[in-house]
Amino acid sequence: MINDPDRLDDVRLACGGDRQAFGRLIDDYGGLVYTLLHRMVQDRDTARDLAQDTFVKTWTKLRSLRKHASFPSWICSVARRTALDHLRRIKVRKEVSMPEESFVENPDNCTQELSPEGIALLKQAVCKLSDRDRQLITLAYWKELNLSDVGRIMGIPESNVRVYLHRARKRLREHLRGYENELLQQID
Amino acid sequence: MSSCSRSTSVLSYLLDELEEDDKVLFERHLENCPFCRDELRLERILQNGLSECTKPSAAPPELRLNVLKRTLTAQQPRFPFLQIAVTLLSGTAVFIVLLKVLRGSGLLETGFGLLMRFANGIFAALEPANSLPLMIGLGIVLIGIATGVASLLPEK
């Protein structure tokens, strides 16, 4: 959900056909859309093209957006459908082998608690998750989206999002089995 | 301690999903259970780590320019209510013409009593204009007016 009044204003203006405002929305949400697509199609060039398609589709459908504040979840739904259509078209559903490069490429992206080695372990574990678990975990930890948004994007009831998220976290822990002590020692 | 049956509540506790009473009970349990404390620390690490490593990457630099170029040809539908009006008017025109044809052919007289009465009502109201070419003309004019109005409206 959007809480920032300026961003809300941009959505409202874009709905009225203002291209400049739409350009600002591309700047604000381009990264989100591109990352989601990259993690789904696992190819940078394809993700770039699909990100363009997503925004163009969004532009042509903007007038049908009733709740301006739900723009982020709406555009993620459009992106997800665009990616699924693409995958269906090329008849490939890539499971498991997601490249780690689709994660944010910042060498300093270790958390206050976790070292770069710990982050690398975590990324490996996320990469081993199924498509759905990975999408769920990716979306659920984006601050722009709440669990209700995640449910809308994934096409599952909000009440089930928590359950699926718990299960995804459990499976993530299974992939990290044997590394728990290593992770704990990193912050000692 | 190598395991604890209550460790299944660790994630719910971390995500603040426990009822207040259960939360208090679990916090008391945490004080005496090193396994659950370790689990909680680990889940916290994962929570922070996931927030960090699932962060969106930057958008491709050319995205904005390319999209805005494409939006010049991909127009927003101007006024959806006009499209709806066009659809409704076209639908009504086609329906009236169809009714007229069916009524003339006598098909409505058997088994479609209600529809026949409806058709009789409509055509009685339209009696002065009760001829097929006129009805078709009326439909075309309605569609034409609605489409014309829609195309004349300025793009925002």
Image (spheres, coloured by chain):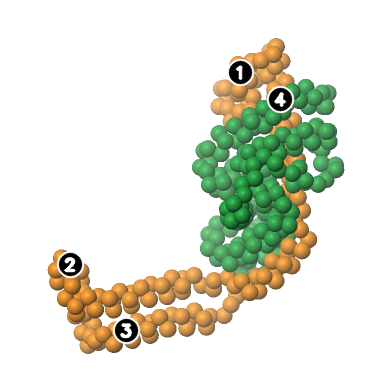
Chain colours: A green, B orange
Q: Please identify, in this view, whether the residue under mark 2 or under mark 1 is nearer the observer.
A: 2
Q: Provide the chain ID for the residue under circle 4.
A: A
Q: Provide the chain ID for the residue under circle 2.
A: B
Disc 3 designates what residue?
B136
In the rendered structure, which amino acid carries the disc numbered 4?
Answer: Arg
In the rendered structure, which amino acid carries the disc numbered 1?
Answer: Arg
Q: Tell me if B31 is positioned left or right of B94 in this view.
A: right
Which residue is drawn at the image coordinates 58% and 67% (left, top)?
A60
Alpha-carbon distance for marks 3 and 2? 23 Å
Disc 1 designates what residue?
B6
In the rendered structure, which amino acid carries the disc numbered 2?
Answer: Phe
Alpha-carbon distance for marks 4 and 2? 71 Å
Q: Is residue A121 above or below residue B88?
A: above
Q: Earlier in the sequence, mark 2 or mark 1?
A: 1
Q: Is any atom of residue B122 visible in this view?
A: no
**Mark 2, residues whose alpha carbon is within 10 Å: few (<14), some, or many (≥20)?**
few
Tell me, for residue B112, which label it has, or none: 2
